[in-house]
Image (cartoon, rainbow, N blue to C red):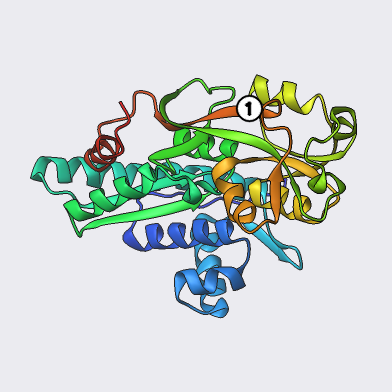
Amino acid sequence: MQNKKKRAIINQITDFDIKLIRLFKTVIECGSYTAAESILGITKSAISIQMSDLEKRLDMKLCHRGRGGITLTEEGEAVLNLAEVLLASIEQFRSDVNQINNDLRGDLNIALVNNLVTQPHMRITHALKDVRALSDKININITMSTPSDIEKGVIDGRFHVGAVPSTNKVSGLEYRPLYTERYYLFCSDQHPLFMQPQPDQSTLNHSNTVVTSHRMTPDAIAMHQKLNCCATASDHEGIAFLILTGTYIGFLPEHYAEYWVSKGRMKALLPQQYYFESEINLTTKRGAQFNQILNQFLECVGAD
């Protein structure tokens, strides 16, 4: 009978192991060794050596490299999930110790949906400024991502807090209202409807329309159902790109479209009829252990 290969057993996690795990997580998030070079501050060859070291220490193949980037193996997927839990636990330990010492020191990992920076209220911007002013030992890490990834990241501990639209709320998360965005239907100056003071509603309803590929509120869904939706985009920037072609119309937040409106490049179509509102919420993990830095951020942003 052929002997089965004996797998490595991890008896203890060393500082070197944690360093390699952090590197592995960063490489996967970047998608390639080349993209990870600038983030890690080391060469591709050094990254390759350290990735090989981690695979040898764990005695398993974690990923494959190809022209399309990095592909995780099944074991690599499992290790990545465990790595995120481990690193989040380390950060929580540091936060708890700092609380005992009454010292604000550590990370604030915040994830945002794209294009909130043009929101005129700037509550997040002001809150981040106030938190950083409390201690120069606070490291603020911002990730731009999709609503579903943000919610998943808050649940698994990658993010302390996220800002997402209010659509289908996920169990296990708490949502705090931040502000409300109003969306209008826009066309560009290259579109035939631009020069019409009062566009014909039937013509408008049959015009090519771009729609977001993410979850929408019931009001947004109802509004899009009136239109000829024939293209999708993953974020506001993608929608704006297609609107500016002059071939499509689409909904954008008023504050985001203002840049092009002020330059005469876009205008809202029948704004009294074609609009909807979307609430932006801060979301945190329900029942999460107390985090002093996160608590200070929530106080600064005024999220009750």
What x and y, as percent, mark residue 197? 78, 40
What x and y, as percent, mark residue 211? 75, 38
Q: Quadrant of the N terminus?
A: top right
At 44% from the left and 45% from the top, the residue drawn is: 120
User: Mark 1 — residue?
Assistant: 276
Specify the farthest residue to the front.
Answer: 197
At 46% from the left and 48% from the top, the residue drawn is: 83
CA neighbours of label 1 inside 10 A, class few (<14), some (14 to 19), many (20+):
many
Q: Is residue 295 left or right of residue 116?
A: left
Q: Nearer the viewer, residue 55 or 96?
A: 96
Instruction: Note whether 42 is above or below 94 in the view shown.
Output: below
Instruction: Say whether residue 1 is visible.
Output: yes
At 59% from the left and 40% from the top, the residue drawn is: 253
Instruction: Note whether 139 is above or below 36 in the view shown.
Output: above
Q: Nearer the viewer, residue 99 or 3?
A: 99
How many circles with numbers are drawn on the protein?
1
Instruction: Note whether 293 is above or below 206 in the view shown.
Output: below
| Residue 251 figure quarter | top right
Instruction: Note whether 219 is above or below 122 in the view shown.
Output: above
Q: Secondary structure at mark 1?
A: strand
At 73% from the left and 25% from the top, the residue drawn is: 223
Q: Nearer the viewer, residue 204 or 9?
A: 204
What x and y, as percent, mark residue 295? 25, 36
Q: Amino acid at mark 1?
A: Phe
Q: Is residue 82 left or right of residue 242?
A: left
What x and y, as percent, mark residue 147? 57, 37
Q: Nearer the viewer, residue 29 or 111?
A: 111
